[in-house]
Structure formats: C-alpha cells, structure tokens
Amino acid sequence: MKKGELNRRISIWRAEPLDDGTATVNGEPAEIGKRWAKKHDVSDGERLRASQQGQDLATRFTVLSGPLTRTITGKDIIKLGGAVYYVTGTKEVDALRRNDGIEITCSSQPDITA
C-alpha cells in the first residue's frame, strides 16, 4: 500500500459506555480521530457471490495501522463527507511489510425517498 493511495479523509466515531444509574448504556458517538484512507466500494457481482441482498451498500476503507486504527471494531462509525458507514469488520493487510494496513469493512444504507 502506497501513501499516495490514501486520498480520502475519514473520521472515526465511537460511543463510550455511560452509567445511567440503572444500567450501562452507550452514549452519543463522538469523533475520536481522523485518518487518511483508500476507499473501495464492493461491486454488485461480489455482493451477489456473497449472497447479500437489499439496500445496504458495502464499502472497504484501507488505512495505515496505528494505535487508533488497530482499536476499530464493529461498534464504531466511519464518516466521509455526508455519508455514515457502520463498521462490520476489520482485518490486517500487508502484514509482512513495514507499513502494515488495516482494512475496514463497512455498510451504509442510501437514503430512500418515496
């Protein structure tokens, strides 16, 4: 992965658990950092082979591995422009290279107008 390929500035959001006096609940998501990323939308053919249907759009972001990006989980949200992406999974890429990368798989739902 070359740094020049990281041409999108994403923001990473996380909801921290709060004790409301009765139970522990997730608070409002807050931005915890921004990173440069490469964006790759999953093709329709790839979605069909994975038996996905519906209005969910699948996107992958690749970022450099670091203390923040290694903590991203399915509880986090990625924002790019006005779009919101819900993290569904992460994995390491380029594990044998010096600049290890993290691939973040996300889903989003397009606005549906009637």
Image (cartoon, rainbow, N blue to C red):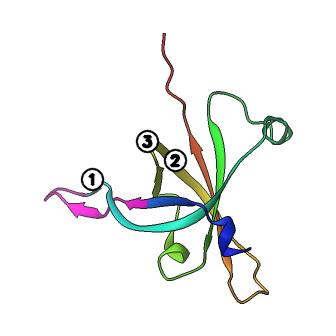
Q: Is residue 23 magenta?
A: yes
- Residue under numbered circle 2: 85
Tag 1: Cα neighbours inside 10 Å, few (<14), some, or many (≥20)? few
Which element carries disc 3, helix, strand or loop? loop
Q: Residue at x 65, y 48 (%)?
A: 59
Q: Quadrant of residue 56?
A: top right
Left or right: 83, with 50 as reference point: left
Q: Nearer the viewer, mark 1 or mark 2?
A: 2
Density class for disc 3 (Cα within 10 Å; few <14, some 14-19, many ≥20) is few
Name the spot of residue 76 as percent of width and height, x first.
46, 58
Mark 2, secondary structure of its residue: strand
Label 1 secondary element = loop
To which residue does mark 3 refer? 82
Q: What is the C-alpha distance between the residues marked 3 and 2?
A: 10 Å
Distance CA(mark 1)–CA(mark 2): 16 Å
Three-letter code, disc 1: Glu
Q: Where residue 51 sits: x, y (%)? A: 80, 36
38 is within the stretch colored magenta: no
The nearer-to-camera label among 3 and 1 is 3
Q: Nearer the viewer, residue 97 or 107?
A: 97
Residue interval drawn in magenta: 12-24
Q: Residue 6, percent across and down? A: 63, 66
For label 1, the residue is 28
Q: At 51% across and 49% down in the image, what residue appears?
A: 86
Q: Nearer the viewer, residue 10 or 74?
A: 10
Between disc 3 and disc 2, the foreground one is 3
Please, which residue is most extreme toward the front here?
4
